[in-house]
Image (cartoon, rainbow, N blue to C red):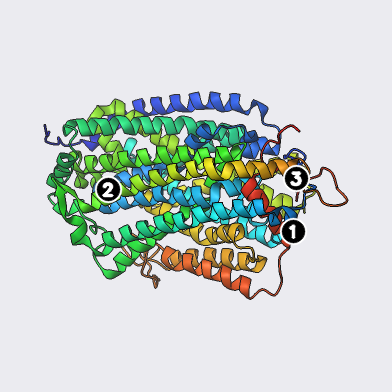
Amino acid sequence: MISIPAAVDVAALKDTTLLNMGIFGLFVAVTMVIVLRASRNNKTAADYYAAGRSFTGSQNGTAIAGDYLSAASFLGITGAIAINGYDGFMYSIGFLVAWLVALLLVAELLRNTGKFTMADVLSFRLKQRPVRIAAAISTLAVCFFYLLAQMAGAGSLISLLLGISDWGGQALVIIVVGALMIMYVLIGGMKGTTWVQIIKAMLLIAGAAVMTFWVLAIYGFNLSDLLGGAVETAKNPAVLNPGLQYGKTETSKLDFMSLGLALVLGTAALPHVLMRFYTVPTAKEARKSVVWSIGLIGLFYLFTLVLGYGAAALVGADTIKAAPGGVNSAAPLLAFYLGGPLLLGFISAVAFATILAVVAGLTITAAASFAHDIYASVIAKGKADADTEVKVARRTVVVIGIMAILGGIFANGQNVAFLVALAFAVAASANLPTIIYSLFWRRFTTQGAVWSMYGGLASAIILIVLSPVVSGAKTSMLPGANFAIFPLSNPGIVSIPLAFLLGWLGTVLDKKREDTVKQAEMEVRSLTGVGAEKAVDH
Amino acid sequence: MGNSARTPDVAASADFEEVQATEQFKELRKRHRSFVFPMAAAFLLWYFAYVLLADYAVDFMSAKVWGNINVGLIMGLLQFVTTFAITGWYVSYCNRKLDPIAAEIRHGIEGHEFDKAGNRVGGDTQ
C-alpha cells in the first residue's frame, strides 16, 4: 500500500510547543537526577576526566555511539538524504567506515599509553612542552568547530519547534541549552556525562528504529517502493543516483572526494572520541567499546537511509526546505507526519538531548585538555595538585560553555552534517598524522610532530576561511564579502596529505634523535597494556 | 605530571628496551602489524574506490538492479557489510593471536623478569 503524502502543516507545529517542552523538561529532570547520583564519588582527577575508568566496554560503546550520533547524524544526514538523495547517504558510509581506522590503528594502543587526553599519548616519547601545547591547541580548535555545528543544530531545531524565527528568541533558547550543559558537566564530570550519553543513545536509536519501522510499514516493507515514493514526490529520478549535490561541476566532484577523505580519516582523531577510550579499565574493554559502537552506529545509519528517503517521499523536499530550520528539520517533520505531535515531541526531545549531551562531552574534553595539558603541565610545570587541576577544569567548562553559546547564536542555518565534516577535516589534518606516526614510526621526532600539527591545523582553518563556506556564495556565512580563493568547501584533500608530508619532512630534517628508551617503553606499553591493565596477583 | 591517578606502576622498574628486543615481543609486533596494516589498506582502497565510482561513474552507479534499487545503493550497503565483517575478523584475530602473547609479556614484566640493574621500585612513569 502506498499512501499519498498529506501536506505537513508546519504552522500547526506551534500548537504542540507545550507538549514538546514538557517531554524535554522530563528528560532534563530524569537525567539530572542520574547525574547527581553518578557524581557522588567524583573525587580524583581520574574520576572527573575518566569516570574512574569504571565503565564496561558495552556501556562505554553505547556512550561513544551517543557522542558520535550527534545532531549532525540524526538531523543532518536525514536532511541531506531527504534533499540531496544519494549524496547524503555518503555521510553515513564515511562516518561508519571511519571507525575501522579507530578500531584497527588507534583505540587500544592509545588506551594503553595515555591517561586522560590525546596529548598524553602524543607527548609520551617526544618533548613534553611543545607537543603538549600543540596537541591541546588542536584539541580546543576541533572541539570549537564541533560545538559550532551542535549549536547550529540546536538553533534549527528550536526555530522549528517553537516557530521562533526571530534572532532574539532563538538566542534565548540557545542560552538555556548552553546553561543546562554547563550544569551537567560541572556537577557530573565524565561519569555523569557518560550516563547522559548512554541514556540518550538508547532513546535516539529506539526512536529512529520506531520511525524506520513505521516508514517501511507504509511501503509494505519494500525498500524499492519507498525509493519509488521518494522519486514520485521529488518528481526527479536522480534522487536515487549519486551526483545530485556534488556532480554538477569538476570542482564539486573534487569537493566530494575531499569530503570523503575527511570523513573517513577524521573519526580516529576526534579528541572527544579518543578521550572516551580512557573511561574503560583495559584495552580489551576499549576494543569491546569500539565493536559495540560500530554495531550501534552502523544500525543507526541504516535507519537514516530509510528516514531520509522516507522524509523525501512523505514530507517532500520543498516542504522541508520551506520549514523553519530548513534542511535540518527533515527528521522532526517526518516524525510529525507519522505520529503527530506526540512522536514529534519525543523525537525533538531526543534531538535536544543529543545536542545537550554531545556539547557536554565536547566541553569536558576541551576543559580536560586545557587543565591537564596547558595548565598543569605547562603553566604550573607539573607542580599543580589534582584538586587545583580539577578546579581549573571546572572554570574552563564555564568559559567554553559561554563561547559555545555565543558561537551557537552566530552559527547560521547551514546543514549541521556539513559543519561537522569541517570539524572532521580539522581533526584529520591536525591530529591523525601525529597519532599514527608516534604509534608506528620509531624515527618520528618532536619537530615532525610540531610541524604536522600546526601545519595541518593552520592549513585546514585557513582553507576553510578562504573557501565558499565563509564568503563568496549565497549560502556563505558572510554572503556579502568575497575572498573565496579556495574553491572547495572541505579542505581535507589538501590539508590532510600536507600534514602527513610535514610530519615526515619535519622528522627527516630533524638532526636531533628522540629518546630510544621512551620509544621502547611506548611500543611495549601500547601493545601489551602493561601498567594500564590491572596487575595480576603474583 | 600533576596527577597521582594511576596506581603505583608495576612496570616502573622494567627495562623496556630489553623487552622490545625479545623474540616474543617482536612476534607480537609482527602479528599486530601484519594484520592491521594490510587490512587498513584494503578497506581504505575499497572505500575510495566506492567514492570515486559515486563521483565519476554516475551511470554505472545509477544502473537499476532490482526495482528502484541501483548499483550505488547496493555498493553502499556492501560498505556496511564489509565494515561489520572486518570488525568481527579483527576481534577474533586478537582473541586468538594477540591477546595471549600480550598477556604473557605483560605478566613477565609485572613479575619483574625484565627489571633494570639497580632496580628502582615504584614511582610514576612519566
* Residue under the image location 25 percent in, 28 percent down: A340
The chain letter for the residue carrying disc 2 is A
Which numbered disc covers residue A81?
A: 2
Query: In the picture provided, is A130 more to the left or to the right than B113?
Result: left
Please tell me in which quadrant of the rendered image residue A397 appears: top right
- What secondary structure is marked by label 3? loop
| Numbered disc in front, either 3 or 2 | 3
Quadrant into which the C terminus of chain A falls: top right
- Give residue A454's quadrant in the image: bottom right
Of the numbered discs 2 and 1, the one sitting upstream in the chain is 2
Q: Residue furthest right?
A: B118
Q: Which residue is mark 3?
A: B11
Report the residue at 39% width, 25% height from top. A23
- Crowd rating for badge 2 (residues with CA inside 10 Å; few <14, some 14–19, many 20+): many
Q: Which of these two is toward me, A345 or A304?
A: A304
Q: CA distance from mark 3 to mark 2?
A: 52 Å
The picture places residue A506, in percent across and down from the top left corner, at 61, 72
Provide the chain ID for the residue under circle 1.
A
User: Residue A296, how many percent across, how many down?
Assistant: 41, 37
